[in-house]
């Protein structure tokens, strides 16, 4: 499987900061895109895949914290590293509670930012992998017929074929056939693996 490209996005209204961070990030072999405002970031078409966001807290228009709120409303958001020259502890606590990876006060050391970026991208990789795996489970589950979905509900509850047949008003052999088809379509050979897949779907 081809790995997705990894991106670092920088949102800061200060051009000199954007240029400095862009140069630093590229110097370690990472792709970077910069944006002068939160609105510009929201309006941009960004490639899918693994990414993290370096975000200034205070900017004209939509602030960094407000952008964080917007991004978290759609579910798991891109990992964020906040940078600021005017931060305070309550602001940092709020940002971290909402899932920020790091909160750095300017001026900060290049190594501190790069460490934060690598940590954020590692988190993004985990999230991307999880989303990809759950997406594949959803695709397989969509192949099941309505009856097979009824049967799988009994399987994951630990019901015997005889019990499922009685509840569904079908023969035990019919349940066995459905069970075989379910395992084939879901791409598993062991019942515990099937149960885990359904649990992941329910938790997603």
Image (tube, grey):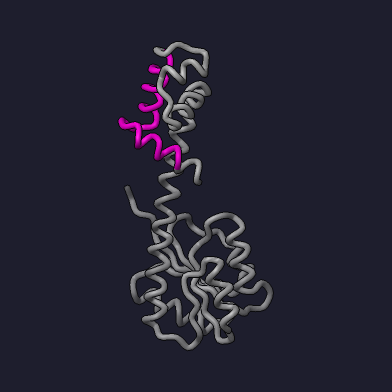
Residue 123 shown left or right of residue 39 in the figure: left
* Extreme residue toward the right, this view: 61
Secondary structure that dominates the magenta span: helix
Q: Position of residue 179 (x, y in %)?
A: 39, 22
**In the image, what residue occupies the spot 45% across and 37% down?**
198
The answer to whether one can see residue 33 in this image is no
Residue 135 colored in magenta in the image: no
Q: Position of residue 84 (x, y in %)?
A: 55, 82
Residue 204 shown left or right of residue 110 in the figure: right
Q: Which residues are magenta?
A: 174-199
Q: Position of residue 13 (x, y in %)?
A: 59, 79
**In the image, what residue occupies the spot 47% across and 55% down?**
48
Viewer-nearest residue: 106 or 178: 178
Residue 189 colored in magenta in the image: yes
Say if 177 sits above or below 122 in the image. Answer: above
Viewer-nearest residue: 57 or 43: 57
């Amino acid at each position: 499987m081809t790995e997705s490209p990894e991106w670092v996005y920088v949102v800061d209204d200060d051009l000199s900061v954007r240029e400095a961070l862009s140069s630093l990030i590229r110097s370690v072999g990472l792709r970077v895109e910069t944006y002068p405002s939160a609105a510009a970031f929201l309006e941009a078409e960004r490639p899918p895949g693994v990414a993290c966001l370096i975000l200034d807290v205070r900017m004209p228009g939509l602030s960094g914290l407000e952008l964080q709120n917007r991004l978290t409303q759609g579910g798991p958001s891109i990992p964020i590293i906040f940078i600021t020259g005017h931060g305070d502890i309550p602001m940092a606590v709020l940002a971290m509670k909402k899932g920020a990876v790091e909160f750095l006060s300017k001026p900060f050391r290049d190594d501190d930012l790069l460490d934060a970026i690598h940590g954020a991208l590692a988190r993004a990789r985990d999230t991307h992998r999880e989303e990809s795996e759950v997406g594949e489970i959803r695709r397989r589950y969509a192949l099941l017929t309505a009856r097979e979905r009824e049967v799988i509900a009994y399987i994951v509850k630990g019901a015997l074929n005889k019990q499922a047949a009685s509840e569904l008003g079908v023969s035990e052999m019919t349940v066995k056939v459905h069970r075989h088809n379910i395992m084939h379509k879901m791409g598993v050979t062991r019942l515990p693996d099937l149960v885990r897949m359904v649990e992941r779907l329910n938790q997603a």
